[in-house]
Image (cartoon, helix red, strand yellow):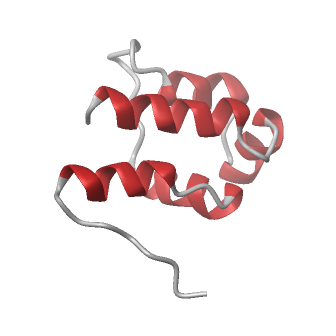
Amino acid sequence: MSEKIDKAIQNLVLNGPVPLEELARQLGKTPKTLMREVDPEDKKAKLGAETLVEIMRITGGVEPLRLMAEELDYSIESID
């Protein structure tokens, strides 16, 4: 993934509307494990696509998805 996407995911986990501890609990992970998974510098821990989708669902933050679409020359729009 691009650095922009990695940073957007990390930012959503650290600074999003759901506190890290609560987000980790809802994902069935420890905060330490979740932090490792979203740390772009930690090459031994990987964030799975299913976990990313759950992070976006729980937080309501879709910036990582928007950036992914942008990299593929697509855009996303809400169907609210």
Residue found at the far top of this picture = 41
Q: Quadrant of the C terminus?
A: bottom right
Residue visible at 61% across and 55% down in the picture: 61
Provide residue 2's location: percent of width, then percent of height: 26, 32
Q: Is residue 12 above or below residue 45?
A: below
Q: Quadrant for residue 46, please give it.
A: top left
Residue found at the far bottom of this picture = 80
Residue visible at 69% across and 55% down in the picture: 59
Q: Quadrant for residue 65, please give it.
A: bottom left
Provide residue 33's location: percent of width, then percent of height: 60, 27
Count all numbered tags in the image, as a single digit.
0
Residue visible at 42% across and 38% down in the picture: 47
Horizontally, is 4 left or right of 20 in the view? left
Residue visible at 68% across and 29% down in the picture: 14
Closer to the camera in the image, 28 or 60: 60
Closer to the camera in the image, 50 or 5: 5
Q: Is residue 47 above or below residue 53?
A: above
Closer to the camera in the image, 56 or 77: 77
